[in-house]
Image (cartoon, rainbow, N blue to C red):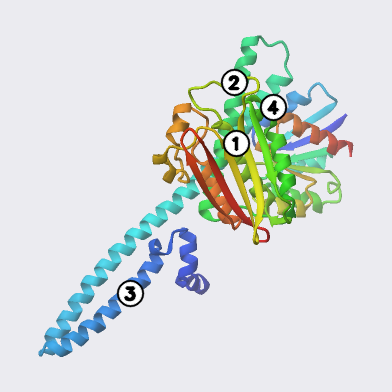
Amino acid sequence: MKRILFIEDEAAIHKTFTDVLAREDYEIISALDGEIGLRLAKEKKPDLILLDLILPKMDGFEVLKALKADEETKRIPVIVLTNLEQMEDIQKAIDLGARTYLVKSNYDLKEVVDMMKKAIEE
Amino acid sequence: MTFGEFLRKLSIAEECRRYNTSLWQCPQFLFTVMGLLIILSVVFSFILGNRYIRDPEITLLFILSLTGVLFAMAFIITRSFEQLAEANRLKTEFIGIVSHQLRSPLTNLKWGLDFLMTETTQHTQQEEGYFHILKDNVNRMHEMVNDLLTVSRAEQGTLPFQEKEFDFAELVEQMLAEFQSAIQASNIQVKVEGERVPKLYNDPSLVRHILGNLVDNAIRYAWRDHEPIPNGDRKAQIVIAYRGAGDRLRVEVRDNGVGIPRQDQKYIFQKFFRSTNAVRRQTEGSGLGLFIVKSLLEKAGGEIGFASEENKGSTFWFTLPFKK
């Protein structure tokens, strides 16, 4: 069973993705802030991380930096899923090692799920 | 305040850019102009006083009074403009923040609806109908929030801009493919009259937005309000024409639709303005489209104009430098 970690402060998004992926062979782990997200990434070693950028306690950039600096987590693909769309944010996340940068409001649910599956398969 | 910040405060150009106002509404520029006027007035009144007033004390009193009055006037005018400029800046910032914050709940709504529409089964026809109404309205709200964000960025001078070389003919083709269903649903014939032109070096997403908006308007207003969209051979017509004009590309979007009433024409590039045609026809829109197009063209180094006659149609044109 593949494991996906959502680091996202919107509970509604956790619920939607948990329900969408419930019928498939995925385990969803939820973290509502950056600190918990980073801890869970180290403990659970997920196959994919979906990371929001505006988060309580520790923002997404810091989480991404810490994930990529740690030997245990640096190979986990990270998809940034956010509503920030300024070029400097996109560039910063890619420079820090994000695999993909998605602006939430530009995608349908199915498109995001398909990209998640593709990232895990690769 | 550090010394660097103090020096930056003295820079008129930088402060005026921060307020994003024209030079004659910029408080720092006005303050400098007023200061120069006061100095000139004092020198002039000194010369006059020296020549026509015998008593030097009266001359001094005259100069001091004049300086005091001018200084008070300068302070009131500059302060008023500063308050206006600051209010305008805060408003733009507020729109940006609110629009950004609105995006999160809208995305939750959109994805929740996606889930209900695609992942759950056995909906009645009535439920399906309501799902589609909800989805359409979420999309509309999403577009409006995006428009507000673009306006806010245009006013703050922070519109993203990523230059690269691209083929305009390809962009037209891709854009028409995206509009295909709307074009068919509105029974419109689209003709492209393009000359061979050099590649553009600009931001393709901005150019796509500009052309897309003009074509979208042409589709919306293709048919006059008293006639229903006919089926069959009778079609409205839109022409997209482009050619090189010196070192610039000139693009025209022509339609034979409703046109813009003469009394509305001078306002159509204003923010939130909706022509009487738009209101009467109850087409969706926030009145921001053409304002955004104009702002994007300014960013891309282009110009825009139009000619329109009510009930005969409109031609919108814009130019862009091949190399910005």
What distance separates the C-alpha of mark 1 from that of mark 3?
A: 51 Å
Q: Chain of mark 4?
A: A
Which residue is more in the foreground, B51 or A98?
B51
| Location of mark 2 (residue) | B230
What distance separates the C-alpha of mark 4 from that of mark 1?
A: 36 Å
Which residue is more in the foreground, A39 or B210?
B210
What distance separates the C-alpha of mark 2 from that of mark 1?
A: 19 Å
What distance separates the C-alpha of mark 2 from that of mark 4?
A: 46 Å
Dots 4 and 1 on the same chain = no
Mark 2 lies on a secondary structure that is loop
Type of amino acid under label 4: Lys
Pointer 3 with pointer 2, Cβ within 8 A: no
- Whether residue A49 can be seen here: yes
Question: At 58% across and 55% down in the image, what residue appears?
Answer: B302
Q: Is residue B102 above or below residue B324?
A: above
Dots 2 and 4 on the same chain = no
- Whether residue A12 can be seen here: no
Pointer 4 with pointer 3, Cβ within 8 A: no
The image quadrant that residue B158 belongs to is bottom right
| Location of mark 1 (residue) | B216
- Camera-nearest label, 2 or 4: 2
x then y, percent, for residue B33: 35, 72
- Camera-nearest label, 4 or 3: 3
Type of amino acid under label 1: Asp
Mark 1 lies on a secondary structure that is helix
Mark 3 lies on a secondary structure that is helix
| Location of mark 4 (residue) | A15
x then y, percent, for residue A99: 80, 46
